[in-house]
Image: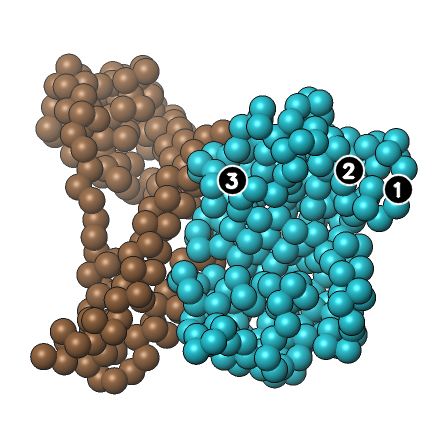
Amino acid sequence: MTAPAGSLLTADALRKAYGPTVALDGAEFSIHAGEVVAVMGPSGSGKSTLLHCLAGIVTPDSGSITYNGREMATMNDAQRSALRRSEFGFVFQFGQLVPELTCVENVALPLRLNGASRKAAEQAALTWMERLEVDDLRKKRPGEVSGGQGQRVAVARSLVTDPRVLFADEPTGALDSYNGERVMELLTDAARSTNAAVVLVTHEARVAAYSDREIVVRDGKSRDMERVV
Amino acid sequence: MSIGHTLLGLLESGPRHGYDLKRAFDEKFGHDRPLHYGQVYSTMSRLLKNGLVEVDGIEPGGGPERKRYAITEAGITDVQRWLATPEKPEPYLQSTLYTKVVLALLTRRDAGDILDNQRAEHLRLMRILTDRKRKGDLADQLICDHALFHLEADLRWLELTAARLDKLAEVVAQ
């Protein structure tokens, strides 16, 4: 595959097997800055594996992933970790907030890990919490807030480092319709305002409807629906 | 949607001219399909004939006479009955798609492609509705949500069908 010009993150001919199970079998992907791409497909189709490979969490058996012109395979573990900390943001379905920390401490955590002072980190965290409409929860612990509120806190945390790519794996999977849609509205508004690319793994059509286009993964193979037509 | 019942319902708040009825209909319900004047006047003639509305007054104007319509007791009963009766679900889309999928399997074409393309088409419309919902007021949001949930239901059926294609192929081949 030739990635479209100006792509921020691309993957070509990705293969990944877990023992005898083939998770990815020649998958392709590309995304531009500021674009929201939904990765859809049934359970077990390989969509989460694709996200984990793109994010540098899982190393593919073969194929290439290029981020901002750099081949990921040429980076060592430390470089990939640094990339994940500073350039990538993550939102998952469950259990991402540290229960012992307050919400503002949770949101500030990535900045603290990158060496920011507590005051500066929490100030930036509060700005994001305001945008996600959860600043009133700053002193509460994750156990004291609702699922929808907790997910908004998690989205604030994923965006606090101003990532260039946000990876969201079923970000609304544990929420009811109303809270799920609100999280998607806030997440995509925030990402678009910072020109971040969003890789959105979801099996829900109403969530995918917040994307600009979708990739369908089936049996480890990807299909870019925009280029099919 | 029953245009007759909707126009009758609009008349319940007070008598109106045909033009006012059209304007009220378009404003509240005609987001995608505004009514034609011809539709309004043919519908009002029918309602008049059936005794569900009556002419409340006629105003001569520069052009044709302007009739003002009022709802009758029978009209109010009719609206009430319509509102209280649930709509029949319309499974037409599934029937058409089912036929296509079965035909694809029978002719050894890729039925998965049909489902993927249909999903893409559904999502295209869902994106438009989602965008309209984000920019609209509460009424827009509720109307769009209703359409979105219906489209999502179609898609869930599509996903389930996609997951069962192998089994369906076996059945079709028998």
**Amino acid residing under circle 3:** Glu
For label 3, count other residues whose C-alpha is less than 10 Å away and answer few (under 14), some (14-19) or many (20+).
Answer: some
Mark linked to residue A136: none
Is B60 situated above or below B143?
above
Mark 1 touches mark 3? (CB < 8 Å)? no
Q: Is residue A106 left or right of residue B119?
A: right
Mark closest to the chain's N terminus, 1 or 3: 1
Image depth: mark 1 or mark 3 in front: 1
Mark closest to the chain's N terminus, 1 or 2: 2
Which residue occupies 70% across, 31% down? A101
For label 2, count other residues whose C-alpha is less than 10 Å away and answer few (under 14), some (14-19) or many (20+).
Answer: many
> Which residue, given by chain and number where applicable, does mark 3 sit on?
A181
- Colour chain A appears in: cyan
- Colour chain B appears in: brown
Disc 3 from disc 2: Cα separation: 25 Å
For label 1, count other residues whose C-alpha is less than 10 Å away and answer few (under 14), some (14-19) or many (20+).
Answer: some
Q: Quadrant of the N terminus of chain B?
A: top left
Mark closest to the chain's N terminus, 3 or 2: 2
Callout 1 and callout 3 share a chain: yes
> Which residue, given by chain and number where applicable, does mark 2 sit on?
A108
**Amino acid residing under circle 2:** Ala
Which residue occupies 72% across, 77% down? A73
Image depth: mark 3 or mark 2 in front: 2
| Residue A12 coordinates in the image, percent (x, y) | 62, 79
Mark 1 touches mark 2? (CB < 8 Å)? yes
Q: Quadrant of the C terminus of chain B?
A: bottom left
Mark 3 touches mark 2? (CB < 8 Å)? no
Q: Is residue B85 left or right of residue A177?
A: left
Callout 1 and callout 2 share a chain: yes
Q: Is residue A114 left or right of residue B28?
A: right
